[in-house]
Amino acid sequence: MSLLSLHLFLPIIGIIVLSIVKKDQLLYITHLLISLASFLLAIIIFAEKNYYLEHSLNVLEIIPKISLSFSLDGLGLIFLLVSNFLWLVTTVYSDRYLKLNSIGNKSKFYIFFTLAMFSTNAIIYSSNLFTTFIFYEFLTLSTYPLVAFKMDRQSIDNGKRYLYYLLGTSIIFLLPAIILTFNLTGSLDYKPGGIFLDNQNYLMINVLVLLFLFGVAKSAIMPFHKWLPAAMVAPTPVSALLHAVAVVKSGVFIIMKIILFIFGTQLLQKTGADLILIFFSSLTILFASIVALRQDNIKLRLAYSTVSQLAYIVLSVSILAPLSILAAVLHLVFHALGKIMLFLSAGVLTTCMKIKNVSDMDGVSSKIPFTIFFISLGALIMVGIPPTVGFFSKWYLLLGIVQSEKIYLFIILIVSTLLNASYYFPMIYRSYFCKNNSVYKDDQAEDSLLILPIIIVGVITVMLFFGVDSIIIFTQGYIIK
Amino acid sequence: MSQLPILIIVLPLLMVPICLFIKEKNYVYLLTLTISSVNLILVCFLFYEVHLGKTIFYELGGWQAPIGIRLQADLLSCYFLLLINFMSFICILSGKEIITKEIHPQNVYLFYIAWLLCNVGFSGIILTNDIFNLFVFLEISSLSSYFLISQGMHKGSNIAALQYLFIGSIGAVFILLGIAVIYAHLGTLNMTDMSEKFLQIEIPKSLIFSIGLLITGIAIKSAIFPLHTWLVRTYAYSPSVIVAYFAGTSTKVGIYILVRVFLDILNAINPLEQYSLIEFILFISLVGALLSTTYAIKQTDVKKMLAFSSVAQLSYIIIALMVLTNDSLVASLIHIFNHSIIKTGLFLVIAIIFVTNQQVKTTDLSGLGKKYPYMMSAFVILSFGLIGVPLTSGFISKWYLVTSILESDFWYLSIIVLITSFMTLFYVWKLIEKIYFSQAENIKAEPVLTHQGIGVFVLTALTLYLGLDTTLTVGISEDISYMIMQGINK
Amino acid sequence: MIFVLDIVLLLIGLFIIIRETNLIKKVIGLNIFQASVFIFYLIISKVENGIPPILIGADAIYSNPLPHVLILTAIVVGIATTSLALALIVSIKKKHKTIEEDELDEI
């Protein structure tokens, strides 16, 4: 158990060191070391998973029968590896990014970044809803200073919106949902098959599902998705790691855990509450894609794409068939990898080329070939075109739909794929085939340190395309029993 | 050990003439500090004794209970006694420099004396078992608080004090009248005796009337919506330390009387149920919570903002009390304790930082995050407590409030509690944004003295500690509620 | 009957406190208000055919002496309140040169 607690509290130790260290270079090295250690620990924990999946860590009992406690499960393990790996990757990127964009106050940046990763890890490790809730709020509060990092009017306003949406929904929907669950079941622990007894009031379950769905606004299900575009004022590394991976995926992760381990698939099917989930997630997929079409700002387009992709994951889980749950897990991983690639590349675009809008991307591929290549790769993953990993999640989602006999969902899948393609391909088309009107200066070239992390992620996705079997086997062995 | 209750009242009272004689403000301060720390220790002893499960009685002058006046220390009284004396100690500890700067030098020693008297009044209210005695102690504390308020630097201080005096006296007279009617029916002033007699008689209409009078009187004294206007004005104009002290004590003592009289003495609220008074009070508190939170959002004066926030929080407490289940009683008791600590802490930070500035506008907080990093992080943690962020004590009380209300017949009230606590975020964030995201104006940052810092630190640490370890608040509240509810179901 | 008169007195006092703008008049109103409650105590202490509670023999009916004692305390409290109010009014007069509430409200 010691490793688990070490991994959990490592970022806290890191924060203490970070708040002492003053020099920029040292800050960077400390942050790098923390993220590296965190990633290595995650790997070790993965290697000894059979031990850690069995044991849990009880910290203290806050309210009778409700305690702050941590443990690990298969789903958490996958998410843990992904988030810690991407943290390491972003660390390298963010230092360079901050330097090139001459953003000061690095110490604050690193401290809150580490705090956010601590909260993410804690969410992954939480073994009951109560602990999850605590660190869910923590994550919101620790990312707020990063959203409002530039401290100008716009970032303060957007930061406020970010905070009001996330805290507001969690107070008004999530907290009562948790309390109701506790009242009904007398427990908040995640348990395979759910904690509800069979004799529940159907209406109550439906209401609870709605409360949870809206309460975990980090999963950006419409109508509570507006915080995500608002959060895009943050520096790009923040958008990349936190608002494409850590924060949003925590939201989806919590929703998945609630569906699988609080309600249980059978109860949801019996009460018809899965239809609510399917309805709202399908709605989000379509609307967010349509809105994304109309965004010219690259980061905003990516943000709305995130909204719709997250809804994919939620949709996959709520179909409740084993294969669709597999699709959800796969998409959780692949979307994280693909989206971080896109965001990091967008960061390169703004940093090196001062390009913020899609309409300015004409012909940039000659100037920054690598970046554009990885943007294309990321876009292909998002759309789900065969030579990329994105194809697998779409494929299993299809199989899941067939398995569950909810054939009407095909329409949504097809329409949304077309929409995805139609907002991603213009980016690729413009940068490769459109003619460049303006003349670029000489110093506008790709920065090798910025590109390196993107290349790493890109290579990983390619490797995963061939090694996807291992994830599928792991998922079927440890998550869908 | 049976002498403890009377010692807690008499010791500070004995100090008063001595202080009047000494007059030198530093010595008077030292005496006051000593006495309040001694009092705190005595209360801790008493608490320990009572916690073991017995009730300590002290018969004044040796006269037996129904005829003579009896002091009674049970768990409920000790819980509040601890709160009051702890707050008093913390505020005196941190307040010395502020008081010296704020109060006219000639009046400083009188100020401390009034403080002692006020605390005597509060302790007396809590300890006495005689309802008329309770009225007298209430007036002792009120009279000294009128004086304390009038000493503020703001030019409106004495007007605020006088207005409070009028409203407070009206409340006191209502209480006096209520006591008269109860006495006319039951022929006793002893509260335990009363509770037994209530069970034997059929309650006549005039008694209901007297209960209404008592409620109104207590509601005025404890600033329950809609009788809260004096609170906002006094908080804005009183000396800043006094605000910190009153925020944690005076309204809470009012709640204590409410709990004592309506749950312990009346044994049940059946007379209220008959006339659907409960629904009425719940409705009023609901409106109160909503309106005062809205007002708090609109305020630009920080003290008024926090005052309105107090009114809203009081409404939660009243809602939980009136829902009247075992759990809701626990919830309200927890919230009383936690909210006192949080609010006193917030006002104390304001008091320490704006020593000479009477009217603290929200813009005055601009850029203080850089100047007073520690003070402001304490302020932020305390305001998180106010919102109810997890791992602060505010979250625990919110959890219990919502849980208990959801389980009761009035489950829909929890929606309002949740919405208003979300609205708390709006005004709290207005302050936090100013603190960290606004450019600092050229105010000279005065260093914060260690002992002042300690007071704030202790309150902040308690806010965090009570968010993690709830044995003190939850455990004791459950015992108290068990005790009271046993009485009701007798 | 006497109850009704007493309640009329109480209402008069309350009315003066609420209605008057002159602070001194308000204090007078407060006094009337308090006095009405004092009288109320005296009314309830009266026992039918009771004589003043001075010990004269074994089987006499006395009026209840306790409310009188209570009211003595209440009167003391009332005097304290009144004197404090007057002191505050003096200081208000010194500071603001007026004791009319509507003029003070502007401050």
Image (spheres, rainbow, N blue to C red):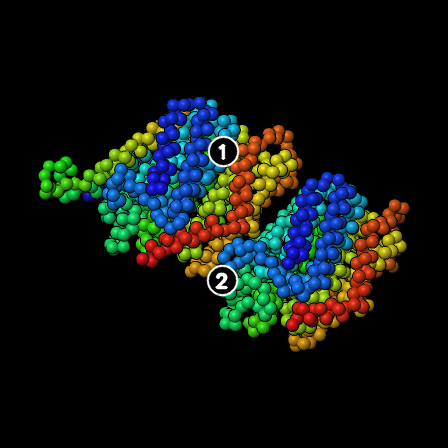
* Residue appearing at x 75%, y 40% in the figure: A23
Q: Are marks 2 and 1 in contact (CB under 8 Å)?
A: no
- Between B487 and B180, the residue placed more toward the observer is B487
Q: Quadrant of residue B60?
A: top left
Q: Can you say which quadrant of the picture contains the N terminus of chain A?
A: bottom right
Residue B308, percent across and down? Answer: 49, 43
**Disc 2 and disc 1 on one polypeptide chain:** no
* Residue appearing at x 45%, y 47% in the figure: B336
Pair 2/1: label in front: 1
Residue C15 has which mark? none
* Residue appearing at x 54%, y 30% in the figure: B355
Q: Is residue B454 visible?
A: yes
Which residue does the numbered mark 1 point to in the structure image? B93
Q: Is residue A153 left or right of residue B324?
A: right
* Residue appearing at x 71%, y 56% in the figure: A41
Residue B188, percent across and down? Answer: 25, 46
Residue A191, percent across and down? Answer: 58, 66
Task: Give the residue type at disc 1.
Answer: Leu
SS category of the residue bearing label 1: helix
Circle 2 marks a residue in which chain?
Answer: A
Distance between mark 2 and mark 1 Cα atoms: 43 Å
Q: Is residue A411 left or right of residue C39?
A: right
Which residue does the numbered mark 2 point to in the structure image? A183
Q: Is residue B227 left or right of residue A273?
A: left
Mark 2 crowdedness (10 Å alpha carbons): few <14, some 14-19, many ≥20: some
